Amino acid sequence: MDTIAMTYYAVICAALSLLSPAIGGVIPRVVAGVVVGMAAAAGLPTVKAMLGL
């Protein structure tokens, strides 16, 4: 995994971990993690293109 991808996913995971206690039980947190993960994976190519990488 390259440095850009690791940094990007670290920021996304950190933001999710800050919000996860407010989401509720285990199932809603897992669903939120899946949705955020899919959105992050889909958005990474755009972020890399914006950065010129």
Image (cartoon, helix red, strand yellow):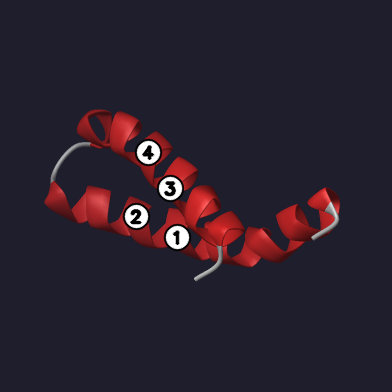
Name the kind of residue labelled 2 in the image: Gly
Mark 1 element type: helix
Of the numbered discs 4 and 2, the one sitting upstream in the chain is: 4
As measured in the structure, the alpha-carbon distance from the residue carrying label 1 to the one carrying label 3 is 11 Å
Mark 2 element type: helix
- Mark 4 and mark 2 residues within 8 Å of each other at the beta carbon: no
Q: Which residue is mark 2?
A: 33
Q: Which residue is mark 1?
A: 37
Name the kind of residue labelled 3 in the image: Ala
- Mark 2 and mark 1 residues within 8 Å of each other at the beta carbon: yes
Q: Is residue 20 left or right of residue 40?
A: left
Name the kind of residue labelled 1 in the image: Gly
Of the numbered discs 3 and 2, the one sitting upstream in the chain is: 3
Q: Looking at the image, how many numbered discs can be counted on the residues?
A: 4
Q: Is residue 45 left or right of residue 18?
A: right
Foreground: disc 1 or disc 3: 3
Name the kind of residue labelled 4 in the image: Ala
As measured in the structure, the alpha-carbon distance from the residue carrying label 4 to the one carrying label 2 is 11 Å
How crowded pointer 1 is (Cα within 10 Å; few <14, some 14-19, many 20+) is rated as some
Which quadrant holds the C terminus? bottom right
Position of residue 23 measured from the top left corner of the image (x, y, whole percent):
27, 36
Foreground: disc 4 or disc 2: 4
How crowded pointer 2 is (Cα within 10 Å; few <14, some 14-19, many 20+) is rated as some
Q: Which residue is mark 4?
A: 14
- Mark 3 and mark 4 residues within 8 Å of each other at the beta carbon: yes
Q: Which residue is mark 3?
A: 10
Q: Nearer the viewer, residue 15 or 4?
A: 4
- Mark 1 and mark 3 residues within 8 Å of each other at the beta carbon: no
Of the numbered discs 1 and 4, the one sitting upstream in the chain is: 4
Position of residue 12 measured from the top left corner of the image (x, y, whole percent):
47, 45
